[in-house]
Image (cartoon, rainbow, N blue to C red):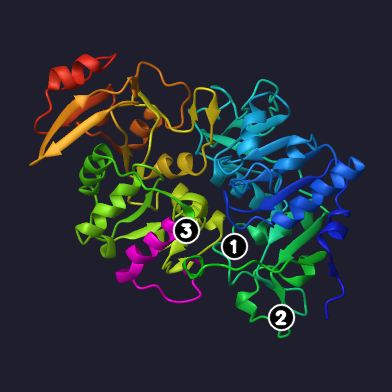
Amino acid sequence: MNAMFQLMTADEAVRMIPDGACICVNSFVGIENPVELHEAIGRRFKATGSPAHMTIVSSAGFGVWEEDRAAEGYIRDGAVDKLICGHFGAMPSTKKIILEDRFEAYNLPLGCISHAIRAQAGGIPGTLSKVGLDIFVDPRREGPGINRISKDPSLVKLVEVDGEEFLYYKLPKINVALVKGTAADPRGNITFDDMYTSGDALSICQATKANGGIVIVQVDRLVGMPSRPRNAVIPGCFVDAIVVVEPGWRDEAYTALTGSFEVPYSEWSVWTDRIEALTSTRRQDSVASRIIGRRAARELHKDDIINVGIGIPETVSHYARKDGMLDHITLTVESGGIGGFPASGPVFGAMIGAASVCDISNQFDLYDNGGLDICFMGALEVDRHGNVNAHRGPGAFAGIGGFANITAKTPTVVFCLTFNTKGLDVTRKGGIVTIQKNGSIPKFVNEVRTVSFSARQAVANGQRVLYVTERCVFTLTANGLKLLEVYPGVDVVRDILELLPFAVEI
């Protein structure tokens, strides 16, 4: 028996967290969050006012899509001074109060946070990356602060190495790790067998111990037999406290996402439907999104390694399946899954029938080094230069997530978006597209509100960039957008050119 760790209740374990702690949470958007540990922190803070003045770091965010569960309560009550996350989508109340300037909040690319955590694990203060150059996080543009009080200049710096520009991402020193695992063996080794992803659990624990901190792990159960060495993601010697929280009943559809049993390619659609029924998730199913998905899917080639964003881009997978291409390509998801079919909605980050699941940092090595062949992403706005805003609307934001990493170096980037929105009515019959009514909100604007994707960087990198809409396709050139295709039935002047606030090459 390893003497280093102790079995504790959640309330006992969180008493170890000091005021001013920098906590790193291992989770992915709305999944694999150590919920009971968060709620114990909330109970302690309500009762005693501690732990206070906390900083919380999470590469992909740590909510559960509910305003009164997990960390939402203690964040709202004022226990946190600073949040640093890649994505805030699963944190509904936190997103609102960030915009009220209640505490500092920063949005960095998901992969850059992951790599900065891994750097701390190796005793290095930060990480260099090309990702983020010339987009919002670049200090020459806006920097990573989300609200008016978020002005920490230490998180992202522009540096030059060997004559090349990089961004240097540096996180505060992590001294508390909160992790959710499946089981702890008699030595305290932690396995992740029933989890959708292991996230960056090992790097987070290593970084915490390198900084003299404490590691608290919530598990579903204890097991009597030692884990097989390759299955033990976190060695027991890194663990200070283990909290056992028996999980609730889980539908078999969710179990399909853990890899507990094989889901062959032929059954992906069946399990997708079952999961969507459970989560009340509706994939984009308008005529416009189907037109976009069908056209975008034509860009796929056999043996492509790809990433598909949420929303309209998900229709690409539908047509890839319909065309028989799906079993000739390899899908990936930011949480580490490779070779399955990504789930959506509240379980985004999980995969049906994954061939393998790696750490988040390893997955972003693939994305950052241009290892994808093609990606399909959504967009809120596109401007005359070809820049894209995909992460922040008026008075609302979700966060950049993995978008910046995925689009920074992938050879072909396909943005899937409607030409305009709010009231758009489109029909397609016999291959003829008719714009019955335009939406009141344009997607193509002179200047985007904030830059998630830099056209200038893409041109310099030699990337091929397409903007696929329900009526036409644009491509990126050194001078901005060029009209590449107009669909049958669409009037090029009335339906496209007269509605654009800028000129495009034809």
- Residue farthest right in this picture: 48
Instruction: Please give left or right for residue 413 compared with residue 85 in the image.
Output: left
| Pointer 1 residue | 198
> In the image shown, does 29 or 137 lie closer to the viewer?
29
- Quadrant location of the C terminus in the rendered image: top left
Amino acid at the residue labelled 3: Leu
Span shown in magenta: 256-277
**Residue 282 drawn at (x, y percent):** 39, 48
Q: Are marks 2 and 3 in contact (CB under 8 Å)?
A: no
**Residue 225 drawn at (x, y percent):** 71, 85
- Residue 473's mark? none
Q: Are marks 1 and 2 in contact (CB under 8 Å)?
A: no
Up-down relation of residue 205 to residue 401 (above or below)? below
Residue 64 falls within the magenta-colored stretch: no
Of pointers 1 and 2, the one earlier in the residue sequence: 1
> In the image shown, does 179 or 407 lie closer to the viewer?
179
Between the residue at mark 3 and the residue at mark 1, the CA separation in whole angstroms equals: 23 Å
Q: Nearer the viewer, mark 2 or mark 3?
A: 3
Of pointers 2 and 3, the one earlier in the residue sequence: 2
Q: Are marks 3 and 1 in contact (CB under 8 Å)?
A: no
| Pointer 2 residue | 223
| Pointer 3 residue | 278
Up-down relation of residue 255 to residue 314 (above or below)? below
> In the image shown, does 272 or 15 lie closer to the viewer?
272
Instruction: Please give left or right for residue 338 compared with residue 186 in the image.
Output: left
Instruction: Please give left or right for residue 378 compared with residue 304 in the image.
Output: right
> In the image shown, does 42 or 159 lie closer to the viewer?
42
Up-down relation of residue 224 to residue 62 (above or below)? below
